[in-house]
Image (cartoon, coloured by chain):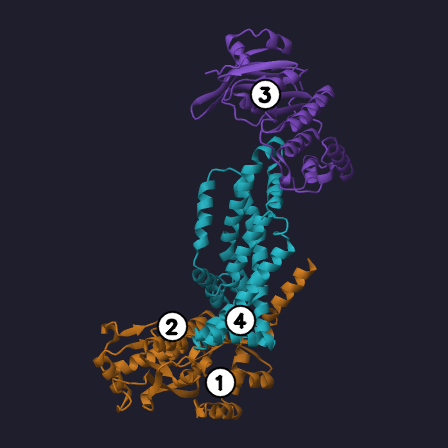
Chain colours: A purple, B cyan, C orange
Amino acid sequence: MFPLILSNLSVRRHGKTVLGPIDLVIDQGGPTMVIGPNGSGKTTLLRVMHGIEHISEGTVDWAQPDHANHAYVFQSPVVLRRTVAENLSYPLSLINLPKLEINAAVEYWIERIGLGKVANRSATRLSGGERQKLAIARALIRNPEVLFLDEPCSNLDGQSTREIETLLLETATAGTRVIMATHDMGQARRLAADVIFMKSGRIAETGLAPDVFDAPQTPDLQAFLKGDILE
Amino acid sequence: MNDITQGLLAALRLILTFDAELWEISLRSLKVSLTAVIIASAVAMPFGAFLAVKRFKYRRLVISIMNALMGLPPVVVGLIFYILLSRSGPFGVFGLLFTPWAMIIVQIVIITPIIASISHQATRELWAEYHDLLISLNTSKWQRIKTLIWDGRRNLLTAGLAGFGRAIGEVGAIMIVGGNIEHATRVLTTAIALETGKGDFALALGLGFVLIGLALFVNISIHWLSRTEREGRW
Amino acid sequence: MIRSLVFAGSLCSASCAQSDILKLAVTTSFENSGLADVLLPEIEADLGIDLQLLVVGTGQALRLGEAGDVDAILVHSRAPEEAFVADGFGTHRREIMYNDFVLIGPKSDKVQIAATSGAAKSLQRIADAQATYVSRGDDSGTHKAELKIWQIAELEPATFGTWYNAVGAGMGAALNTASALNAYIISDRASWLNFKNKGDLALLFSGDPVLFNQYAYLPVNPEKHPTVQYEMALKLEEWLVSEKSAALINTYQINGETLFVFNGQQ
């Protein structure tokens, strides 16, 4: 699967370049936190890597292209208009897994995210935090090699955030490559093994977490970490 | 106003005395319209869903035509199918003219655009909601359509009921291809037309109230059976 | 699956049992008289025929006959009937019975057609006074009869003003309009007697021979349309001119009034 190589990548919308040019190599490791001001292209970068964004120029190449083996969690949790359990089983039903296996997987994950009590409730009736946990479990249920997350905790309370971060760390430890965008610097520090800092659609700085947070190289990153607003 | 009271009384009288002819034409109305709805839905709903999901060159044109066909004048459809099904016409050999199947066919033609259009609209909204997720999960076009149809089934039900309402109240086309033959192709709407023509407004209104009651009954039953209100998601 | 097959089967029964079914196109004036309700059970009992009546205007009845969508027609418009036979669509024409047309109008009858000497005179008065008048306007037997009377009065309906309303509809619908407009109208007697929305209208004039209305039976030519039930149509024809039929027709009454006079030749 790895490495993932983005080469001279650009994404243009309505004549405006929203991302790029980007040259980037992603290898085993992580979790990788993608940080940067709003509009810097974090979401677009993730979507391009996942393969759900149209590329205007350049290439995105996995060493072993296997699209089905990575998953994505959106900023606003998308749930199917079905029960919690059915949401979890949906990705497995798509690949025609036998019913027994599906049920076992669903049971495991429902307990893992603590939604056992509402397994048969319509997912649309869940709270924001519950929905996002469901979305993450649904993303992980097919054992993806890579998990992309786009600011998953941006609208959640502290408790939910904590639970999700714990889940993500466990997932990363278990071997899943986690690549996550966030605007919460505290969260970035808590989770990051390495960091990608973006500004105006380009990658401004990358590096290992301690290096980036303690000794930022570029003035933009220094200002950003101080809390300044970047133009 | 007096005519309306007379009409209500006539309706009650027909129902309470289990008037045999009323039963016969009511049952036939239901059979014809329900058959038409089922067949039309089987075609229109997947088509509407397909239009919402698949992008192709003439998509906008197809959608416009589909919506425009909702305004197809039923009596014109009846006339065209009379010509097609007539003994002198290309499909006369099937002997469908002046039988319930001719009525079912024209009703299918009339209600398919309505069902397709509403199905399309409903599916489009759901697709906007599910779009990113379903693409992210690497679903095939067929899997997407199945998911949209199943998760959108409540709205599709509305589409079906809209088609049913249009079908059961239709009179122009089925008059021409059905012939309003007593004991063979007479239904509630054509009977109403007949009695109105004879000047028997009370009876015509009575039949009209029965027709309204029937349509309401079907709608309420379907809603109740699918428990749409209870789950609060409608 | 099975349910839908059974269902389809039951819908099929009407068309599949083709052998006993005879399709007869009749005019609205015949249907409105109620005579069909008397004759049909007897026909079914005596001949075993399931007689299906398509109640349409004269013009449409002739079209159905030409297309071979019915097995015979029963109408009351001599010239088009003879053309029908001459063009080979029907094998022959058999007279069965006649009734009459009557002049209907508001009870007040300001134009005073009740006292005239003839139908043409009455229509003349209506035209002169420009009293509201409703015409079938649909090329039916009744409409053609009306046009003939205008012709006798040497008047041309095409030149009439807005007082002349051609509705292009069946007898019942035309009567409804006349009732709503409180207008004069020519109707066949049977439809008038059976009409339930008379309002302020009344029967004002009748009896002029020009108002007599001949019904004829025409079987569709099997050479043009081999699928028509010709044998059965002939059987029905014989029954219609039988003594039993004559008796039923001559004794049929609405509110104590006879409507039809049987004049079929055996």
Query: Helix, strand or loop at disc 4?
Result: loop
Crowd band around label 3 with a 10 angstrom C-alpha radius: few (<14), some (14–19), many (20+): some
Residue ID at (50%, 38%): B56
Q: Hey, what amino acid is under mark 3? A: Asp
Q: Is residue C150 above or below residue B129?
A: below
Query: Helix, strand or loop at disc 2?
Result: loop
Judge left or right: residue C30 versus residue B215: left
Name the residue that disc number 2 marks: C169
Q: Hey, what amino acid is under mark 4? A: Arg
Residue ID at (23%, 78%): C130
In this view, the residue in front, A140 or B7, is: B7
Q: Are marks 4 and 2 on the same chain?
A: no
Real-space Cα separation, disc 4 to disc 3, in angstroms = 72 Å
Q: Hey, what amino acid is under mark 1? A: Leu
Real-space Cα separation, disc 1 to disc 3, in angstroms = 90 Å
Crowd band around label 4 with a 10 angstrom C-alpha radius: few (<14), some (14–19), many (20+): many
Q: Quadrant of residue A124?
A: top right
Crowd band around label 2 with a 10 angstrom C-alpha radius: few (<14), some (14–19), many (20+): some
Residue C182 visible in the snapshot: yes
Crowd band around label 1 with a 10 angstrom C-alpha radius: few (<14), some (14–19), many (20+): some
**Mark number for residue B186?**
4
Name the residue that disc number 3 marks: A184
Name the residue that disc number 1 marks: C35
Judge left or right: residue C12 versus residue A175: left
- Sequence-first tag of 1 and 2: 1
Q: Hey, what amino acid is under mark 2? A: Ala
Q: Nearer the viewer, mark 1 or mark 3?
A: 3
Real-space Cα separation, disc 1 to disc 2, in angstroms = 21 Å
Q: Chain of mark 2?
A: C
Residue C54 visible in the snapshot: no
